[in-house]
Image (cartoon, helix red, strand yellow):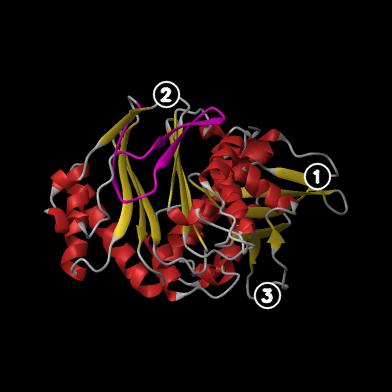
Amino acid sequence: MPEDHARLYAAALDTILRRSHLMAPDEMPQLASAGARHLGVEQTLLWLIDYGQCRLTPLLGPDDEPRDALSVDGSLAGRAFRSVDLMETDAEDGRRRLWVPLLDGVERLGVLELVVPTGGEPLSEEMRRDLGQLAHLLAELLVSNSAYTDHYEWFKRQEAMALPAEMQHTLLPPLTFGTDRLIVTGLVAPAYEVGGDAFDYALNGNIAHIAVFDAIGHGLQASLLANLAVSCYRNSRRAGLDLADTAAQIDRAIDDMFGGERFVTALIGQLDIDSGLFRWVNAGHPAGMLLRGAQVVKELGGEPALPLGMNGLTGGGPESFVVATEGLQPGDRLLLLTDGVDEARTEDGEFFGRTRLAEFAAREAASGLPTPEVMRRLQQAILRHQTGRLQDDATTLFVEWLTGHHERLAI
């Protein structure tokens, strides 16, 4: 790196880091511009993805002109978001316009728009790399500052969010997580009205803990039930309980609270990322799918117990839950879901169905797209099947083991 450029790059990082300590959250646009100016950037704008994963909305400062949202599927900004790749095009007067993905780890938050004077020449690889790192730093600051403000939430929401959905989104982990051996990515729908569906995961050492929940009913009652199930799951997992004991703890908590009148279906699993051994218990939940290459080779049902909250009817305890096992091969993917996915249906009653779901998931997984984009497309296909209005919550979760696709998750 030439000495002058290295000095300017260091000044950009120093400006952002130094000013971020006492930055008010709504000053993020000004902070981004101040840092980028050291690298000759004339215009800077952050665009955030909405909850429906359909639009990119500009994060505007108090003096910025209003800007319309951009379509994820119909804009160059959206292409950068979809492909997790930097996009570059001509701007006016010898400038170049860049769209750089905003990534928190590998979680897609949106894109960073930059206008740089270059005399009409493409940017150097060195400059592209540095602007990508600048975008990554800004994304990390967006996440850390979101704990102190509602400001970013206002820009991410394309419509009013129902209270149950507010609770569920607060409950969820980041939508995407990845290492060189494991990728986990999930979505819940409908984004602004979801109530009873949830997923959770954690990587502890060589064990990836994965769970999908579907609480009976709709609205606030279902959201409260799902919150209880996920909170109890995390508590049991962090206490080091095994799968059967974890399921039994959740079952007992729901039964104690609702006396057998409410229940949650669940698939709770553990993947050893050293060996590829997947172990799980099924509590009245739809079977997961094992994808190998471009095919679904097996359904992962196991021996189902009653839904969580109902096993006290047959005695309860860990012995109610049978642990199933499956050995994965490098490159395998798990697709876990709730019944709102394969039971999604048109107004004429045509179900989306497991066959259609399996074919779509296998085809898109083999497409070469980043895994979060495969998940987004799957959810969009389900919504289109029901003309945008789901009769039930629909949650999908992809788990990839040793696919070699981790390099697609970051620029």
Residue kind at label 2, given as amino acid type: Gln
The verdict on residue 287 being magenta is yes
Q: Which residue is mark 1?
A: 118
Q: Which residue is mark 3?
A: 63
Tell us which disc is closer to us: 2 or 3: 2
Report the magenta residues as a range: 276-302
Residue kind at label 1, given as amino acid type: Thr
The residue positioned 57% from the left and 66% from the top of the image is 156
The residue positioned 52% from the left and 68% from the top of the image is 192
What secondary structure is found at the residue carrying circle 3? Answer: loop
Q: CA distance from mark 1 to mark 3?
A: 27 Å
* Location of residue 48 in the rendering, given as x and y in whole percent from the top left corner: 59, 60
Along the line of sight, the residue nearer the viewer: 323 or 111:
323
Lower sequence index among marks 2 and 1: 1
Q: Residues within 10 Å of mark 3 (few under 14, many from 20)?
A: few
Residue kind at label 3, given as amino acid type: Asp
Along the line of sight, the residue nearer the viewer: 335 or 85:
335
Lower sequence index among marks 2 and 3: 3
* Location of residue 217 in the rendering, given as x and y in whole percent from the top left corner: 38, 68
Q: CA distance from mark 2 to mark 1?
A: 48 Å
Q: Residues within 10 Å of mark 1 (few under 14, many from 20)?
A: some
**Callout 1 touching callout 3 (CB < 8 Å):** no
Q: Which residue is mark 2?
A: 329
* Location of residue 380 in the rendering, given as x and y in whole percent from the top left corner: 61, 54
